[in-house]
Image (cartoon, helix red, strand yellow):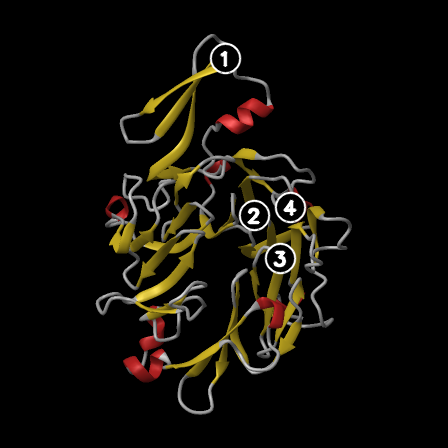
Amino acid sequence: MTEERRGAWFGFGFCGFGQALGSGRGRRVHSPEPLRAPGAGLDICRVSASWSYTAFVTRGGQVELSGSAGGAAGGCRDAWASEELLVVLRAGPGPGAELQAWAPGSALRGEPLWAQTVPDAEREDGPGGSETQDGRLPLLPCARAYVSPRPPFYRPLGPTLRARRLELGAEHALLLDAAGQVFSWGEGRHGQLGHGTLEAEPEPKLLEALQGLPMAEVAAGGWHSVCVSEMGDIYIWGWNESGQLALPTKSLAEDGKTTTGEASGLNENGSEVKRAAGGEDGASAPFITVQPFPALLDLPLGSDAVKASCGSRHTAVVTRTGELYTWGWGKYGQLGHKDTTSLDRPCCVEYFVDKQLQVRTVSCGSWNTYVYAVEKEKS
């Protein structure tokens, strides 16, 4: 049996609408449990989670929905779930593929709300053209347009941008290009664009702070952003309200009753800092609420990162050796640490270590987390 066949998907966090998380007890799953995907035995290759429902894509081209939206369809290459739209990429009747979008309540039934034929990168760019992007929604196969949950649904990218990956947050977008450079645009009031200000950017703008550092991954949370370099370093910025940047945060300090008063200001790199009075040693403790520049984040034991994903206010990272670290908002158990505690530091999800499993990939929904893991090789 191959390593790939020994793998399984796990889920934890919010399951109030019947998403296929663990055993589905109550509204929260606090610790990873095997996925109860609709259609037993499906070979799932991708999970795309919205707040109230989840789309599962199989290697055989099947899409299955679980949660407030239900249904199934074949002949699909990818699916992307949001509360406004379910978007599916299907093999077209001729060259290229067909992009189809439904309202989640009527997903995969009857006629889609809209549909559009999109070209394949291989046909448009010639041999090897697909190597510049990974073909995952919301980025389209031609790598020169993407799909948005709000009109206009089909949005072209600039002619000079050769996209490899694109991620959408609640109000902003991150793009990774073929050279490993990062671009961001959209609302910036929580510092989620990483340009050092809280201003909005209407068009993709190069993240100058990371120029010259080739990136391999980007991930957009609700109002924060993460990228992973080709060397395995993590850079993170944006809103830190629940500790999702792994920086000290006021809300978690208040939960621990460690603050009695505060003053605020900006530090030398533009971060919004609040200082709380009454620390144990008499000194004021800094709390970062907004980090508008990318900040380098070190994982425990100096681990290198290879994958990252963000929920609304939580962050998950997979290391090169197969550990999963999570932090940020934990109210629904989406951190996987057997409780509902929020964390402002990376913490290893011990479930996978205890079960002798190596995590391969992670995909966060707004309030939940999905993980694919395989058995460790026996020595």
Look at label 4 and name its amino acid. Answer: Val
* Residue 353 marker: 4
Q: Residue at x 39, y 45 (%)?
A: 233
Between label 3 and label 4, give the one nearer the viewer.
Answer: 3
Name the residue beneath numbered marker 1. Answer: 279
Q: Distance between the residues labelled 1 and 4?
A: 35 Å
User: Tags 4 and 2 in contact by the CB under 8 Å rule?
Assistant: yes
User: Toward the viewer: 321 or 174?
Assistant: 174
Q: Residue at x 65, y 43 (%)?
A: 332
Q: Earlier in the sequence, mark 3 or mark 4?
A: 3
Q: How many marks can you see?
A: 4
Q: Earlier in the sequence, mark 1 or mark 3?
A: 3
User: Tags 1 and 3 in contact by the CB under 8 Å rule?
Assistant: no
Name the residue beneath numbered marker 2. Answer: 323
Q: How far apart are marks 4 and 2 (CA)?
A: 7 Å
| Rendered-image quadrant of the C terminus | bottom right
Q: Where is residue 69 in the image (x, y as percent from the top left)?
A: 64, 66
Q: Describe residue 322's horizontal placement relative to residue 210 as left or right.
A: right
Q: Position of residue 215 (x, y in %)?
A: 34, 53
* Residue 52 marker: 3
Residue at far top of view: 282
Residue at far bottom of view: 94
Find numbered disc 4 in the image and state the secondary structure of the residue it sits on. helix
Find numbered disc 1 in the image and state the secondary structure of the residue it sits on. loop
* Residue 363 marker: none
Find numbered disc 2 in the image and state the secondary structure of the residue it sits on. loop
Q: Residues within 10 Å of mark 3 (few under 14, many from 20)?
A: many
Find numbered disc 3 in the image and state the secondary structure of the residue it sits on. loop
Query: Relative to 100, is 264 above or below?
Result: above
User: Toward the viewer: 231 or 68?
Assistant: 68
Look at label 3 and name its amino acid. Answer: Ser
Q: Which of marks 2 and 3 is nearer the N terminus?
A: 3
